[in-house]
Image (cartoon, grey):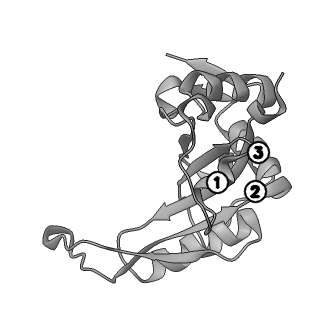
Amino acid sequence: MNPMKKIDIEKITLNICVGQPGDNLDKAIKLLNKITTSKPVKTKAKKRIPTWNIRPGLEIGCKVTLRGQKAKELLKRLLASTNNQLNEKNFDNQGNLSFGVLEYIDIPGVEYDASIGIIGLEVAVTLKRPGFRIKNRKIKSKKIAKSHKISKQEAIDYMKNEYKINIGG
């Protein structure tokens, strides 16, 4: 196999949106810190939604991004919380995937904390190949060739082989 066609994990992003600043946002930050041992950042609203009392600049959620070996180890635990079962709809056409965890207590190694309560979170996994750096570099950045992009089927095959997941309906 061509070594430039090898697929790997670029990053994992965990996201919790609570919709308003305050106590629930503090609980979400505490939860992400507990799961990843990394410091989460607060996310701010970009649009005004009057019916939900949301305005631009209002802190409504938090996220944390993990890369490297730490991301791979956490992904195994997060997939175990879904019983290594994903749906074909969880994969997009660029080869990335995302899924939700309904309750954080489903994640192996994370104990229930009464001060946090029960909160769910979203997981987004970004896949890459060697050579994807050309789209982000400052000097002479270029587009990734269509033949080098990761297709939906390639991402599904990678997850089946590497993480032993089952694909449902």
Question: Would you say 96 lies left or right of 107 here?
Answer: left
Tell me how far mark 3 sits from mark 2, CA to CA: 10 Å
Amino acid type at image mark 2: Val
Q: Disc 3 designates what residue?
A: 77
Q: Disc 2 designates what residue?
A: 110
Residues marked 1 and 2 touching at CB (< 8 Å): no
Total numbered labels placed on residues in the image = 3
Amino acid type at image mark 1: Ile
- Mark 1 residue crowding within 10 angstroms, few (<14) / some (14–19) / many (20+): some
Tell me how far mark 3 sits from mark 1, CA to CA: 31 Å
Tell me how far mark 1 sits from mark 2, CA to CA: 38 Å
Callout 1: SS: helix
Q: Residue at x 25, y 75 (%)?
A: 54
Question: Would you say 53 lies left or right of 26 here?
Answer: left
Q: Quadrant of the N terminus?
A: top right
Looking at the image, the residue that sits furthest to the top is 169
- Mark 2 residue crowding within 10 angstroms, few (<14) / some (14–19) / many (20+): few
Residues marked 3 and 2 touching at CB (< 8 Å): no
Q: Residue at x 24, y 71 (%)?
A: 47
Closer to the eye: label 3 or 2: 3
Closer to the eye: label 1 or 2: 1
Amino acid type at image mark 3: Arg
Q: Disc 1 designates what residue?
A: 134
Question: Would you say 38 lies left or right of 22 here?
Answer: right
Q: Position of residue 74 (x, y in %)?
A: 77, 51
> Which of the two labelled residues, at mark 1 and mark 2, occupies the earlier sequence position?
2
> Which of the two labelled residues, at mark 3 and mark 1, occupies the earlier sequence position?
3
- Mark 3 residue crowding within 10 angstroms, few (<14) / some (14–19) / many (20+): some
Residue 82 location, quadrant: top right
163, 17: nearer the viewer: 163
Callout 3: SS: helix
